[in-house]
Image (cartoon, rainbow, N blue to C red):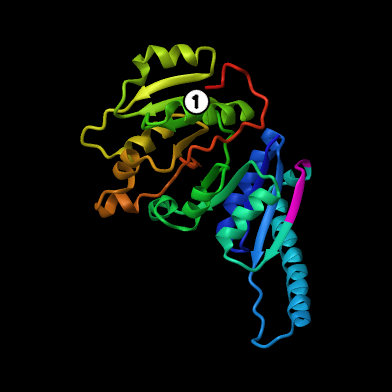
């Protein structure tokens, strides 16, 4: 099944991501890779041997801290982690975002699970922050989890789509949904996808439905919150680079909109043209 990389920085904010990842891995029979990147401070003028020794000591210490942190979170979850294949990886040096991206490749991860913060966090998520750099460079999706979100098995992936690369994107979304046993709802606000006979026929047999939002006087963010709230176990799925969606979602200057908390998980794919999920054996009906 999936190999999931979970970055950990020892702060309490990462606990939400850890807890969600454990439950997600348990329900999907996936493997967890807890990853920490350590910055080693070495005095100027130190020899190569001193640097190597200091790095090795620091990595050993950080690995113990990583295992201890995960163990503390695990104990609060009634030993759920016991049923999940788990690996611990500690790295040193370099920019954290680069090391996470490298770790995804080195560990052959299929998914990143990370905790995030409210609306300001959502804005940073796709507008130049650490996570946006990761999404823009890695070939795997990122599942961003609000720090106060309580785990629910994913039943529906609400795929918010601008229809600019639908055929290529829906393959990735359907592949992911197929792996975790979820259905897909295509959600758009500017395209009558529900009446597109060619696409509907092409995806006949897939667990997929279609909805079109009418915005009116309510913001897109508020529409999305209400839409997901009415669907238990739903996550919002988007591809980076969808300017129509992003501008309406986080481009507003209204303080109230920017202050809203992200209360639902967000599954983000990179809109780069690179297809995720081709290594998995899936039904021909899913392929685009």
Say which element carries label 1.
strand
Q: What residue is shown at x 39% (from left), y 28% (from top)?
A: 187
284 and 228: which one is in front?
Answer: 284
Rendered view: 5 above or below 280: below
At label 1, counting other C-alpha atoms closer than 10 Å, the crowd grade (few under 14, some 14-19, many 20 or more) is many
Q: For residue 36, what is the image quadrant?
A: bottom right
- Residue 167, given in percent of the width and then of the height, sits at 46, 25
Q: Is residue 192 magenta?
A: no
Q: What residue is shown at x 61% (from left), y 62% (from top)?
A: 9
- Residue 177, given in percent of the width and then of the height, sits at 57, 28
- Residue 183, given in percent of the width and then of the height, sits at 53, 24
Locate residue 43 relative to residue 60 in the image: left or right. left
- The residue identified by callout 1 is 184
Specify the segment rendered in magenta: 83-88
Q: For residue 124, what is the image quadrant?
A: bottom left
Q: Is residue 149 visible?
A: no
Q: For residue 161, what is the image quadrant?
A: top left
- Residue 106, given in percent of the width and then of the height, sits at 70, 51
């Amino acid at each position: 099944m999936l190999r999931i990389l979970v970055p950990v920085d020892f702060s309490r904010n990462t606990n939400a991501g850890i807890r969600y990842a454990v439950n997600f891995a348990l329900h999907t029979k996936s493997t967890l890779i807890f990853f920490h990147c350590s910055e080693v401070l070495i005095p100027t003028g130190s020899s190569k041997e001193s640097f190597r020794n200091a790095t090795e000591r620091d990595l050993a210490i950080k690995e113990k801290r990583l295992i201890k942190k995960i163990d503390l979170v695990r104990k609060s979850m009634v030993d759920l982690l016991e049923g999940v294949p788990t690996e611990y990886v500690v790295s040193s040096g370099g920019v954290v975002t680069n090391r996470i991206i490298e770790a995804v490749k080195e560990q052959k991860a299929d998914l990143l699970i990370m905790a995030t913060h409210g609306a300001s966090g959502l804005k940073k998520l796709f507008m130049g922050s650490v996570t946006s750099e990761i999404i823009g460079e890695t070939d795997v999706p990122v599942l961003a989890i609000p720090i106060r979100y309580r785990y629910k098995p994913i039943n529906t992936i609400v795929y918010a789509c601008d229809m600019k690369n639908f055929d290529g994107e829906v393959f990735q979304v359907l592949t992911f949904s197929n792996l975790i046993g979820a259905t897909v709802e295509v959600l758009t606000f500017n395209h009558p996808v529900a009446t597109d006979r060619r696409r509907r026929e092409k995806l006949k047999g897939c667990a997929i439905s279609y909805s079109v939002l009418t915005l009116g006087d309510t913001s897109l963010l508020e529409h999305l919150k209400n839409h997901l709230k009415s669907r238990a176990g739903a996550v919002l799925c988007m591809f980076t680079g969808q300017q129509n969606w992003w501008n309406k979602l986080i481009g507003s200057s209204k303080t109230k909109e920017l202050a809203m908390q992200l209360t639902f998980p967000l599954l983000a794919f990179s809109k780069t043209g690179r297809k995720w999920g081709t290594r998995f054996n899936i039904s021909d009906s899913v392929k685009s």
